[in-house]
Image: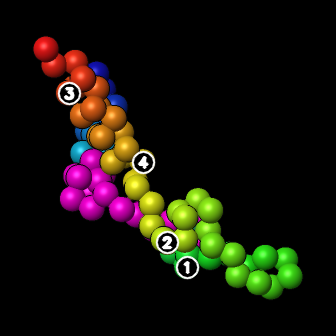
Amino acid sequence: MTPILLLASLTFLGYTLCYLAVCTVSPWGRCRRCHGRRFHRTAIGTRRDCLRCDGTGIRVRIGRRLIDYIRAEYRAGKP
Ligand SMILES: [Zn+2]
């Protein structure tokens, strides 16, 4: 393995581990569709609750969903 490839894979692994650590400590992230504002402006200018986050402005991070899925599968597989 070349040193550059090794460095790149270690960097990727580091970023992944940091992201999963963030997901474990803080599972909620800001809603990307409404940017945490909880509502949208419609074409005629009225407010409408964000459908993606149900008007909460936050959403579960994708990494946290992955962790929860793996945990559920692990528990379901236990004898
Ligand atoms: Zn939203």
The quadrant in which the C terminus is found is top left
Q: Magenta region: which residues?
A: 19-34
Could you tell me the amino acid type at mark 1? Arg
Q: Look at 27% across and 61% down and name the residue there.
A: 26
Q: Which labelled disc corresponds to residue 37?
A: 1
- Residue, far top: 79
Q: Residue at coordinates 49% horizontally, 71% vertically from top-left?
A: 57
Residue situated furthest bottom in the rendering = 45
Q: Secondary structure at mark 2?
A: loop
Question: Which of disc 2 and disc 4 is earlier in sequence?
Answer: 2
Q: Give the label, 1 or 4, closer to the camera.
A: 1
Q: Residue 75, how many percent across, how many down?
A: 20, 27
| Ligand 1 lies under 8 Å from the Cβ of mark 1 | yes
User: Disc 4 marks which residue?
Assistant: 62
Sequence-first tag of 3 and 1: 1
Q: Nearer the viewer, mark 4 or mark 2?
A: 2
Q: Are marks 1 and 2 in contact (CB under 8 Å)?
A: yes
Q: CA distance from mark 3 to mark 1?
A: 36 Å
The residue nearer to you, when weighing 42 against 19, is 42
